[in-house]
């Protein structure tokens, strides 16, 4: 079997990222958009801003949902990339549980090597270290400095076969390699998988966690489509991807993080047997018609309906002189607000946690300022749009507990207004 190309240069893609087929259909055209985490400083507001095509497309051969434009990695994961996993409590807890589950499941002996690809501020590796493992992180951006300050050895670089060889030379092979919420992001996917082939011990496990396409479709999470997410995985194309290498997907199940993800276990060797959980998941995808065009036509129609609804609410509020603001600034809110067309005239600010690295910056594209969320409690605006609606419930409870009386707006999966 000839292996397809899995390393892509920046620019427009004319073939599927897994099977290289040219049979691609557009699900949703989100227009030209800036990279969602490229927030602007006040000085940058005086400069031109780069935008790139953002289209959700689908391969009708292998079924992979993907975008068809690769933005140069250095433009997306620029040195000051403002995302930290450690400051979102739900995420930090999730990472902690993941490290405990993995060590238990694999019966990993103490002092084994654990490598995290895209290790961010070291949150996940800290959990492994506490259990007596040797840990190495790989993180291309300056967020790595937080991990280093916490005593987590971190290589500041993109992961590749060369980096893998370097780690093997210095530390030996890894019993556990993790890639949480980064495996959908890499344009040099082939390099990453070849690196994993070389770094993973024979009885080791490679664990990836990503947004799950079935959740995106069922819960209308089109706002999770952005340039960082080159691919939105489902199991069928993912199994096919690893079949091209000396690796096999052996297990997978759904987890709650990021509004619905899959955790996938990959082992060394070809044609390893799949767990019942993996077979069930593939059956579930088939039953949900995840590989049928009609599913995507219905998805698109529902997206357009929620777009009209949210825009009308914003415009009506502005006309009546009501305050309509945003809460939380996850990457996905850039897709949502740029696509729906909500600018700073309609939404004067987005409130964020006091610890966020985004404070004082402006949303890409629409340039809405990001401010300390204490303003919400002082101002009590008429409407607060929950831009991290995928964590809507805990955030709502927290805001109410702290005395927020505003009407809360859930923009998706259907427009809902929640009064106190
Ligand atoms: Zn394909």
Image: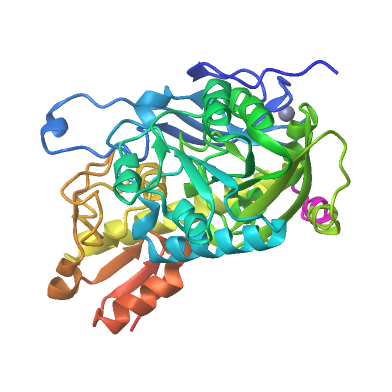
Is 207 on the left-hand or right-hand side of 150? right
Q: Position of residue 65 (x, y in %)?
A: 64, 37
| Prevailing secondary structure of the magenta residues | helix
Residue 203 in view here: yes
Front residue of 331/132: it is 132
Front residue of 378/321: it is 378
Residue 376 to residue 148: above or below: below
Q: Quadrant of residue 280?
A: bottom right
User: How is the model colour-coded?
Assistant: rainbow
Q: Is residue 94 magenta?
A: no
Q: Is residue 290 magenta?
A: yes
Q: Residue at x 16, y 64 (%)?
A: 321
Front residue of 141/278: it is 141
The residue range painted magenta reads: 282-291
Q: Quadrant of the N terminus?
A: top right
Q: Residue at x 37, y 57 (%)?
A: 86
Residue 68 to residue 264: above or below: above
Residue 395 to residue 225: above or below: below
Q: Quadrant of residue 32?
A: top left
Front residue of 204/414: it is 204
Is 375 on the left-hand or right-hand side of 186? left
Residue 62 in view here: no
Q: Residue at x 74, y 37 (%)?
A: 237
Is 266 on the left-hand or right-hand side of 326? right
Residue 51 to residue 347: above or below: above
Q: Position of residue 235 (x, y in %)?
A: 74, 45
Q: Position of residue 85 (x, y in %)?
A: 40, 53
Quadrant containing ligand 1? top right
């Amino acid at each position: 079997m000839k292996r397809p190309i899995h390393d892509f240069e920046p620019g427009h893609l004319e073939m599927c990222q897994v099977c290289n087929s040219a049979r691609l259909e557009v699900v949703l055209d989100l227009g030209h958009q800036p990279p969602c985490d490229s927030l602007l400083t006040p000085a940058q507001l005086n400069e031109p801003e780069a935008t790139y095509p953002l289209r959700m497309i689908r391969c009708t051969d292998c079924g992979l949902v993907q975008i068809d434009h690769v933005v140069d990695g250095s433009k997306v994961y620029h040195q000051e990339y403002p995302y930290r996993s450690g400051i979102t409590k739900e995420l930090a807890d999730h990472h902690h549980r993941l490290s405990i589950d993995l060590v238990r499941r694999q019966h990993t002996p103490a002092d084994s090597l654990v490598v995290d690809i895209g290790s961010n501020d070291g949150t996940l590796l800290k959990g492994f270290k506490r259990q007596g493992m040797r840990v190495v992180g790989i993180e291309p951006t300056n967020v790595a400095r937080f991990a280093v300050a916490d005593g987590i050895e971190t290589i500041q670089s993109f992961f590749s076969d060369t980096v893998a060889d370097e780690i093997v030379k210095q530390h030996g092979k890894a019993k556990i390699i993790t890639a949480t919420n980064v495996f959908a992001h890499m344009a040099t996917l082939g390099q990453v998988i070849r690196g994993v082939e070389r770094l993973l011990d024979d009885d080791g496990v490679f664990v990836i966690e990503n947004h799950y396409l079935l959740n995106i479709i069922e819960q209308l999470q089109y706002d999770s489509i952005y340039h960082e997410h080159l691919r939105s995985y489902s199991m069928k194309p993912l199994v096919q991807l690893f079949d091209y290498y000396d690796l096999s997907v052996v297990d997978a199940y759904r987890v709650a993080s990021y509004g619905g993800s899959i955790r996938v276990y990959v082992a060394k060797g070809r044609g390893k047997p799949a767990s019942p959980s993996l077979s069930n998941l593939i059956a579930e995808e088939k039953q949900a018609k995840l590989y049928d065009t009609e599913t995507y036509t219905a998805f698109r129609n529902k997206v357009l309906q929620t777009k009209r609804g949210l825009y009308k609410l914003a415009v009506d509020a502005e006309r009546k002189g009501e305050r309509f603001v945003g809460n939380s600034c996850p990457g996905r809110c850039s897709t949502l607000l740029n696509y729906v067309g909500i600018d700073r005239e309609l939404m004067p600010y987005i409130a964020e946690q006091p610890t966020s690295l985004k404070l004082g910056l402006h949303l890409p594209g629409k340039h809405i300022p990001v401010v300390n969320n204490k303003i919400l409690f002082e101002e009590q605006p008429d409407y607060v749009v929950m831009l991290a609606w995928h964590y809507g419930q805990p955030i709502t409870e927290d805001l109410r507990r702290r005395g927020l009386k505003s009407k809360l707006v859930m923009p998706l999966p259907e427009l809902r207004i929640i009064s106190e």
